[in-house]
Amino acid sequence: MAKAGKKYVDALKGYDKSKLYDVDEAMKLVKQNAKAKFDETVEVHIRTGCDGRHAEQQVRGAVVLPHGTGKTVRVLVFAKDQKADEAKAAGADFVGADDLIPKIQNEGWFEFDVVIATPDMMGVVGRLGRVLGPKGLMPNPKAGTVTMDVAKAIEDVKAGKIEYRLDKSNIIHCPIGKASFSEADLTDNFNALMGAVVKARPSSLKGTYLKSISLAPTMGPGVKVNTLKVTA
């Protein structure tokens, strides 16, 4: 294991690693712990009691963060004819159809952060499943990225829409903004995400849904949040 850097070690001294903090306190500490020379991303890590191997316990969806993510999102849209024109007018960074397949598959082109597709294009996009899937870029109706309303989908993504889903360890990892954001804005974003995640609790789940929540800047240590205060 790599040795922790001095800034990371110093950050650890400033708070109690084992304590469960209220959201406001945790946000203050996370901002203090962001000591890198760049504007670090603040991430939420939610460990759930779900078992993602069962389809009915999958948790997946999307939410628009009220203050955005602080990141410029590059959007690629798979659409044809009128829908392609709508996508361009709505501010999509790249629009195409079959012509994009070799560029992505053979040339390894990935200069985009989100992929949106009209339903009729999913046959084409499906051919890219092996390369888009592992990167979490595959369009999905639950996330609102497979839709005929491409203009609305682009607007939402550009405004700060993020997707949340369980990883293989049944943990949800999501960015909620930058360390330069105010504590109030980060807290608003956190609450918007948690509201959506709490609503997405699978009905078949028995036992604890939110096992632990931590907040962390890109390069700094995590701060544990009191889950009882979040689910109340």
Image: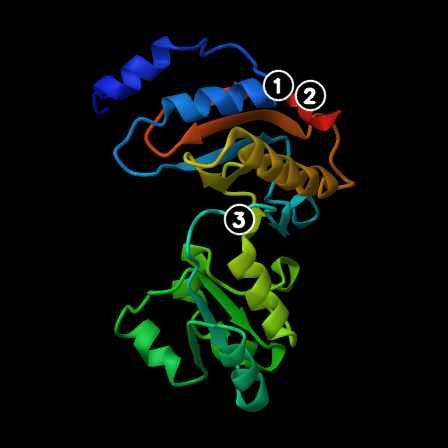
Badge 1 amino acid: Asn
Instruction: From the viewer's side, name the closer residue of 92 and 98.
Output: 92
Per the image, the residue denoted by label 3 is 68
In this rendering, the answer to whether 29 lies above or below 101 is above
Depth check, front residue: 67 or 33? 67
Given the image, on which type of amino acid does mark 3 rest? Gly
Give yes or no for contact between labels 2 and 1 (Cβ–Cβ under 8 Å): yes
Distance of label 2 from label 1 (alpha carbons): 6 Å
The residue that disc 2 covers is: 229
* Viewer-side residue, 56 vs 151: 151
Q: Earlier in the sequence, mark 2 or mark 3?
A: 3
Res. 103 image quadrant? bottom left
Please state the horizontal and vertical placement of residue 28, each as a whole percent of the image: 49, 21
Quadrant (top left/top right/bottom left/bottom right) for the C terminus: top right
| In this rendering, the label closer to the viewer, 1 or 3 | 3
For residue 197, side relative to residue 217 (left or right): right
**Front one among 108 and 224:** 224
| Image coords of residue 44 (percent x, y) | 51, 34
Point 52% across, 29% down: residue:
183
- Where disc 1 sits, the SS reads loop
Q: Residues within 10 Å of mark 2 (few under 14, many from 20)?
A: few
User: What residue would you read off at disc 1?
Assistant: 226
Residue type highlighted by circle 2: Lys
Is mark 1 in CB contact (under 8 Å) with mark 3?
A: no
Q: Is residue 143 left or right of residue 180?
A: right
Decide: marks 2, 3 in contact (CB < 8 A)? no
Disc on the earlier residue, 1 or 3: 3
Question: Around disc 1, counting alpha carbons within 10 Å, would you say few (fewer than 14), some (14 to 19), or many (20 or more)?
Answer: some
Secondary structure, mark 2, is: helix
